[in-house]
Image (tube, rainbow, N blue to C red):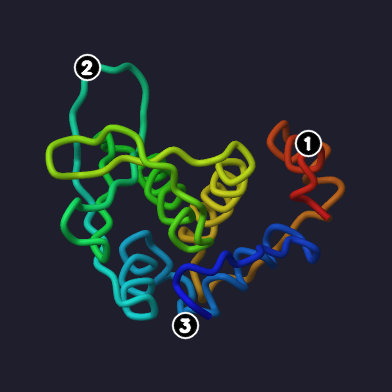
Amino acid sequence: MSSRQRRKHNTRGGVAEWITHEFTALDLSPPDCTPEALARALERTRRITIEFRPHASDDPGVYGLLYRHETCNALYVILYRPTHNVALRRLILFHELAHILFHHALTEVPGVGGLRGYMITSEDDAVAEAFAVGAMQYSFLDAAAPQTQLDGDDAAATSAFGRLLKKAEYWP
């Protein structure tokens, strides 16, 4: 598959199965499913370089921003607000990595320094967020621990995020 070809995500079997598939397709399994491990796997398969750079800002809230270097299209830079919360940091980084993983179309906007910034469609952003939430949870699994899973309908019914996924048709 060409690095420019958009890949369809498949959540028909459920979000947990989708996340498991994405990691195992890159030869990753718990507990080695961190954003750093996903970035290295994408680097190997896409022949790109991905850098994570903490970026302090006066803007409120948490954020991650995906950039590419002006003179090197093979270099992706993910700027993120530093946080001591490991789960939140993984969520931010997985979200930005999902845009690369799924070949989301990047619309150029003004950048920072020698970096070009990008905007993503709302649909692609929803996919990235769904992936990020599932990947963040998956990244904390212990491979040795037995896995239990709620029935998909029960899990979705109790979660506002699950209801959003169903409404957006990202849930089976």
Q: How crowded is mark 3: few (under 14 residues within 10 Å), some or many (20 or more)?
A: few
Q: Mark 2 points at which residue?
A: 58
Q: How crowded is mark 2: few (under 14 residues within 10 Å), some or many (20 or more)?
A: few
- Mark 1 element type: helix
- Give the left or right position of residue 134, taking residue 35 as reference: right
Marks 3/2 in contact by CB < 8 Å: the verdict is no
- Give the left or right position of residue 146, taking residue 49 as reference: right
Tell me the residue at 55%/47% (across/down): 133
Quadrant of the rendering where the C terminus is positioned: bottom right
* Coordinates of residue 142 in the picture (x, y in percent): 49, 68
Q: Mark 1 points at which residue?
A: 163
**Foreground pick, 83 / 105:** 105
Query: What's the CA distance linking mark 3 and mark 1?
Result: 31 Å
Q: Name the residue under label 3.
A: 27
Tell me the residue at 78%/36% (across/down): 163
The kind of residue on which mark 2 rests is Asp
Vertical arrangement, residue 163 with respect to residue 21, above or below: above
Marks 1/2 in contact by CB < 8 Å: the verdict is no
